[in-house]
Amino acid sequence: MKLLNELKAQLAELNAEIETARAAEVEQAIADCRALIDLYELTASDLGFVKTQTVPANRGTRTFRAKAPRAAIPPIYRDPKTGATWSGRGRVPRWMDGQDRADFLING
């Protein structure tokens, strides 16, 4: 029976060999994938990297591409008492209801 230290040393050697072989095979796999993508002119959507939505058959068969996420709108107004903010879009918050908006401007 081998000692624990000998087995750990063998394991470390095997892990190093595995990582070297993996790195070499990954480079070849990436090159093969790129060649196929160029050959067939595939897109990220074709490969399933972009989510799509299909409308049910009773309304026709159309596929919609996912939209890019919208950027957050910076707040324009701040409540001096609570620190709550509002971007100026949507419903007016209660802390601002019926008052002059200019009093709550962040940059002014």
Image (cartoon, rainbow, N blue to C red):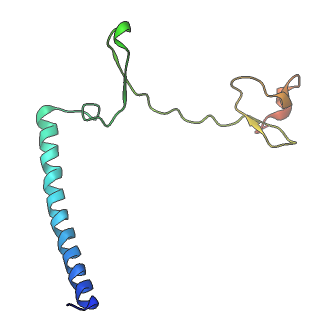
User: Where, quadrant-wise, is the N terminus in this rendering?
Assistant: bottom left
22 left or right of 68 in image:
left
Q: Residue at x 74, y 23 (%)?
A: 91
Q: Quadrant of the C terminus?
A: top right
Of residues 68 and 54, the one nearer the viewer is: 54
**Residue 84 screen position, x and y as percent:** 78, 39
Tell how many labels: 0
Q: x%, y% of residue 54?
A: 36, 20
Q: Measured along the vertical axis of the image, is residue 25 above or below residue 55?
A: below
Residue occupying image coordinates x 79% and y 28%: 93
Residue 38, image x and y in percent?
Answer: 14, 37
Q: Indicate left or right for 31 with 56 as reference.
A: left
User: Foreground residue, 16 or 77?
Assistant: 16
Please give the name of the residue rendered at 84% of the width and 28% of the height, measured from the top-left corner: 94
Position of 63 compared to 103: left or right? Answer: left
Q: Is residue 25 above or below residue 8?
A: above
Tell me which residue sits at (49%, 33%) in the image. 69
Residue 3 coordinates in the image, percent (x, y): 25, 92
Res 57 quadrant in image: top left
